[in-house]
Image (cartoon, grey):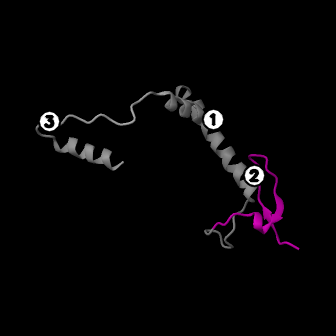
């Protein structure tokens, strides 16, 4: 018989606690026994619900910045930008600040 472990669930997101096989729990090195407190299915549902709740809070605080991830993705695909950046014209001398900015942008 497989060993069972208690999945704690989440009352906030209406996930009932239940017993599940030990193999269903993700590894969590920071825990004493090395396993997570929620089964893999509930953990995925929990993190998804947390992300959606955060997006809803952000939308309530900033209505104009409430674009969803899919809207942002389609908007960036629709922009017609050249594949390469045009080369910057160089002057005789650059200030130290301009040189550092250029160095940082090249590093990215």
Q: Residue at x 74, y 47 (%)?
A: 12
Observer-nearest residue: 22 or 60?
22
In terms of secondary structure, where does tag 1 sit? helix
* Residue 69 placement, left or right of 13: left
Q: Are marks 2 and 3 in contact (CB under 8 Å)?
A: no
Give the answer, above or below, for where 35 lies relative to 86. Answer: below
The residues bearing labels 3 and 1 have C-alpha atoms spaced at a distance of 48 Å
- The secondary structure that most of the magenta stretch takes on is loop
Indicate the position of residue 96 as horizontal and vertical percent values: 17, 45
* Residue 16 placement, left or right of 29: right
Give the answer, above or below, for where 16 lies relative to 49. Answer: below
The residue positioned farthest toward the top in the image shown = 64
Give the answer, above or below, for where 30 lies relative to 107. Answer: below
The residues bearing labels 2 and 1 have C-alpha atoms spaced at a distance of 19 Å
* Residue 25 placement, left or right of 67: right
Q: Residue at x 76, y 63 (%)?
A: 24
Q: Which residues are magenta?
A: 1-28
Q: Earlier in the sequence, mark 2 or mark 1?
A: 2
Q: Which residue is mark 2?
A: 10
Q: Which residue is mark 1?
A: 56
Q: Which residue is mark 3?
A: 91
The residues bearing labels 2 and 3 have C-alpha atoms spaced at a distance of 61 Å
Q: Residue at x 75, y 59 (%)?
A: 39
Label 3 crowding class (10 Å Cα cut-off): few <14, some 14-19, many 20+? few
**Residue 74 falls in which quadrant of the image?**
top right
In terms of secondary structure, where does tag 3 sit? loop
């Amino acid at each position: 018989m497989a060993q069972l472990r208690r999945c704690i669930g989440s009352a906030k997101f209406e996930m009932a606690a239940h017993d599940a096989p030990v193999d269903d729990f993700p590894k969590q090195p920071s825990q004493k026994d090395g396993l997570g407190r929620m089964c893999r299915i509930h953990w995925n549902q929990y993190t998804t619900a947390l992300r959606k709740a955060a997006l809803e809070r952000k939308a309530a605080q900033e209505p104009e910045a409430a674009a969803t991830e899919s809207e942002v993705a389609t908007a960036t695909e629709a922009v017609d930008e050249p594949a390469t950046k045009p080369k910057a014209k160089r002057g005789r001398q650059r200030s130290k600040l301009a040189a550092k900015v250029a160095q940082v942008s090249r590093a990215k």
